[in-house]
């Protein structure tokens, strides 16, 4: 079974995706890492503003070398959102995501356009969200815990800017699929959110 999980930055979708993948014994792809890696490559080349360079970086991406720890910085979240708005970058990353989803037995993918573009036929789709202030608080703790010099205010501003860019772009904007179930985790702890997500997936497994 393919489980598609979308939502805005720091909504908790990654944690839920990992937990669901472990529960069902399915492989998991955090598609944000792909865009972060492309952004990282462009920044390293000093060519973030260069569309052709970002498309080239996306085509050359080697998914076996992705380093989640190095990629989950605030700077690369912003760079990812810049390159992710470009059609050519998204097109270059489409096949590898679809191949991952087509693995025998299924897979869990999380991102912004999994339920709408990458896996529109996924039987189980979740759209995970939370209030911006709650998401900023979670992301601030995560980044500060990793030793990044950030402030809550800066993280909140970054989240608002990224939300606007991800929702407003013309290429595969962040949007909830018509057949996705909305899960607002603002008032939920990890265990409660996981229980709610599991209930959604189990209902879909039973064809409800
Ligand atoms: O963890 P967080 O939600 O902050 O970010 P992420 O999931 O790693 O994604 C970083 C950026 O990549 C997002 O702000 C999107 O612009 C972009 N992205 C996308 O466009 N499509 C995806 N399927 C995944 C990420």
Image (spheres, rainbow, N blue to C red):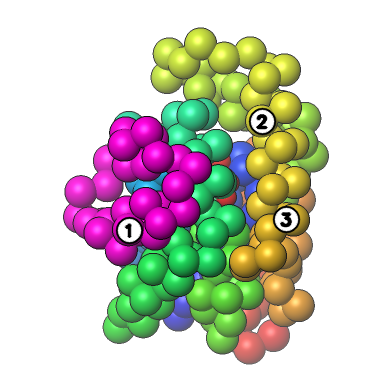
Residue 79 x/y as whole percent: 50, 39
Near mark 3 (Cα within 10 A), the count class, few <14, some 14-19 or many ≥20, is: some
Question: Above or below — where is 119 with respect to 132?
Answer: below
Quarter-wise, where is residue 69 in the image?
Answer: top left
The residue sitting at 30% across, 83% down in the picture is: 104
Quick check: marks 3 and 1 in contact, CB under 8 Å? no
Quadrant where the N terminus is found in the figure: bottom left
Q: Which residues are magenta?
A: 41-68
Residue pointed to by mark 3: 167
Quarter-wise, where is residue 153 in the image?
Answer: top right
The residue sitting at 25% across, 59% down in the picture is: 60
Q: Tell me: 21 left or right of 204.
A: left
Which of pointers 1 and 2 indicates the residue nearer the eye? 1
Q: CA distance from mark 3 to mark 1?
A: 24 Å
Residue 132 x/y as whole percent: 77, 36
Quadrant where the C terminus is found in the figure: bottom right
| Disc on res. 158 | 2
Q: CA distance from mark 3 to mark 2?
A: 14 Å
User: Is 103 colored magenta in this rendering?
Assistant: no
Q: CA distance from mark 1 to mark 2?
A: 26 Å
Near mark 2 (Cα within 10 A), the count class, few <14, some 14-19 or many ≥20, is: some
Return the residue nearer the eye: 118 or 135: 118
Residue 180 x/y as whole percent: 70, 72
Please tell me which of labels 1 and 2 falls first in the chain: 1
Please tell me which of labels 3 and 1 falls first in the chain: 1
- Residue 108 visible in image: no
Residue pointed to by mark 1: 56
| Disc on res. 21 | none
């Amino acid at each position: 079974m393919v489980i598609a999980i979308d939502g805005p930055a720091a909504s908790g979708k990654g944690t839920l995706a990992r937990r669901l993948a472990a529960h069902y014994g399915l492989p998991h792809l955090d598609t944000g890492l792909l865009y972060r890696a492309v952004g990282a490559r462009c920044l390293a080349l000093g060519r973030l503003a260069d569309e052709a360079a970002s498309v080239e970086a996306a085509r050359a991406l080697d998914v076996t070398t992705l380093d989640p720890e190095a990629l989950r910085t605030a700077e690369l979240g912003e760079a990812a959102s810049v390159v992710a708005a470009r059609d050519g970058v998204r097109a270059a990353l489409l096949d590898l995501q679809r191949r991952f989803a087509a693995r025998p037995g299924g897979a869990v993918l999380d991102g912004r356009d999994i339920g709408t573009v990458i896996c529109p036929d996924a039987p189980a789709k979740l759209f995970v969200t939370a209030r911006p202030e709650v998401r900023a608080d979670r992301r601030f703790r995560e980044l500060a815990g990793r030793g990044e010099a950030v402030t809550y205010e800066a993280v909140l501003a970054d989240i608002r800017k990224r939300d606007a860019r991800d929702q407003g772009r013309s290429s595969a904007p962040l949007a909830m699929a018509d057949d996705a179930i909305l899960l607002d985790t603002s008032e939920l702890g990890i265990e409660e959110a996981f229980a709610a997500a599991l209930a959604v997936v189990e209902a879909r497994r039973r064809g409800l």
